[in-house]
Amino acid sequence: MDRPAMPPTVIAAVVVIGAIVLLGLAVTLAAVAAASASLPIAVVALAVVFRCAIPLLFVVFLVRGHPLAHQWATLVSGFAVLIGVLGVVTAPDNLTRAVLAGYVALPLSVIVLLGREPSLRYFDLQCPACGAFRTKAKSFLFNAKGCAACGHRWNHRQGSSRATGPG
């Protein structure tokens, strides 16, 4: 089965995640510049890898339409929103609250964008049998899926599988 065209909601989510990666890189580079004399190059390299390379893997698999990337991008964005809200609540001044509130808006928009119906269809999360969006992973890497509504099982981008019963 051919991959469908990427809907505007997924394009927007990828752009927002790219902006988050760039902001993270800027913060990391600013921290490295402030402490450049005391940090070994290995620590700097690890900081850049964790701030950029891992989120960019999300972007690659989001563009490819893999449901595991959808799940992890939504989950990680949820954690980022939670941490950001805690930061807003405990911020010492209004300027810090405003900056953190702006930061919370980015991952929150990712959650909203990836939760829209065109995005769910793009990530093959709609049951081909009943049309419900109540998909559950049936394999560790989310290549096999099952519908919580009707019990139909299918493989990623195939629309159906040999096992179509509940479970």
Image (tube, grey):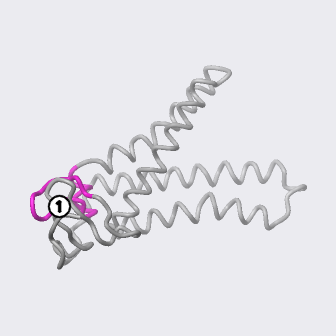
Judging by the rendered image, the residue that carries numbered circle 1 is 151
Residue at left offset 9%, top offset 58%: 130
Q: Quadrant of the N terminus?
A: bottom left
Above or below, comparing residue 39 to residue 5 in the picture = above
Asked whether, in this view, residue 63 is left or right of residue 52, the answer is left
Residue 23 against residue 89 in the figure, above or below: below
From the viewer's side, name the closer residue of 84 and 130: 130
Image coords of residue 121 (percent x, y): 21, 59
Above/below status of 112 relative to 118: above
Q: Main secondary structure of the magenta part?
A: loop
121 sits to left or right of 104: left
User: Which residues are drawn in magenta?
Assistant: 117-135
The residue at the point 20 percent across, 59 percent down is 147
Q: Report if residue 134 lies within the magenta region.
A: yes
Quadrant location of the C terminus in the rendered image = bottom left
User: Which residue: 41% across, 50% down?
Assistant: 74
The 10 Å Cα crowd at callout 1, few under 14, some 14 to 19, many 20 or more, is many
**x then y, percent, for residue 166:** 18, 64
Which residue lies at the image location 66% right of the left edge and 20% below the top edge? 93
Is the residue 159 above or below the residue 31 in the image?
A: below
Residue situated furthest right in the rendering: 37
| Residue at the outermost left position | 130
Q: Is residue 126 magenta?
A: yes
Which of these two is toward me, 138 or 141? 138
Residue 18: image location, x then y, percent: 48, 56
Amino acid bearing label 1: Gly
**Dot 1: what SS?**
loop
Q: Quadrant of residue 107?
A: top left
Which image quadrant for residue 95? top right
